[in-house]
Each structure stands twice: as C-alpha cells, then as structure tokens.
Image (tube, rainbow, N blue to C red):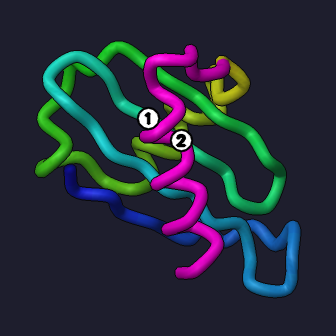
Amino acid sequence: MDIRVFQTGRHYSEKGQRIAYTWDDNHIYFVDADRGIEGVFINMLNLEHVSSSHLLHMYDAGGDRFFNLDELYIRDALSDRAYNF
C-alpha cells in the first residue's frame, strides 16, 4: 500500500501540518499528524491524478471520521509515516 504525506502549508506545529494518506479500491484514509485526526472516505477518485489541494479539501469536509477496528493497521502505518516525515 502506497502511503504518502503532504504538507498543507498550515502551521499547527514546528514542522507545519502534515497529512498522511493512502487508498485502496474503496476508501481513502487520512491521518493528521499534528492534530491527531483520522478520516476515512469512500474512494471515487483515481488518486494518481488528484492534487494535494483537492485532498485537503476532502479532509476539511469531514476529516474527523474515525477508522474502525479492522483498519487500525492502516492508521498505525499512516501515523508512523506522518510523524517520521
């Protein structure tokens, strides 16, 4: 699973706000490393062709939806990637 991190340009911490994300056929998963927010969305996009600003807009629209227990491993991997970016 390809995990990516992008800087939003917002400065909630010394390093700025970092959001890690990944996707599968059905979902997009987000972790906000600075504010401890986790989100999961239905994936209706080909993320290879989506800008980070569009991802950020999706995150702002509902980034406080938590992962369920079956997806904790994704959250853990995303959190680790974001914190170590």
Residue 54 versus residue 11 in the image, above or below:
above
Residue drawn 31% across the image and 53% down it:
51
Residue 80 placement: quadrant: bottom right
Quarter location, residue 7: bottom right
Disc nearer the start of the sequence (1/2) = 1
Query: Residue at 65% across / 29% down in the picture?
Result: 63
Q: CA distance from mark 1 to mark 2?
A: 8 Å
* Magenta span contains residue 79: yes
Tell me if mark 2 has few (under 14), some (14-19) or many (20+) residues whose alpha carbon lies within 10 angstroms of its own: many
Q: Which residue is mark 2?
A: 75
Stretch of the chain drawn in magenta: 66-85
- The percent coordinates of residue 38 (x first, y second) are 65, 35
Contact check, label 1 and label 2, Cβ < 8 Å: yes
| x then y, percent, for residue 53 | 45, 52
User: Going 66% across and 21% down the picture, which residue do you hit?
Assistant: 66
The one of 9 and 72 positioned closer to us in this rendering: 72
Q: Is residue 76 left or right of residue 35?
A: left
Residue receiving disc 1: 29
Is most of the magenta stretch helix, strand or loop?
helix
Q: Is residue 53 left or right of residue 23?
A: right
Judged from the image, the secondary structure of the residue bearing numbered disc 1 is: strand
Amino acid type indicated by mark 2: Arg
Q: Please tell me whether residue 62 is drawn above or below residue 23 in the rendered image.
A: above
Q: Amino acid at mark 1?
A: Tyr
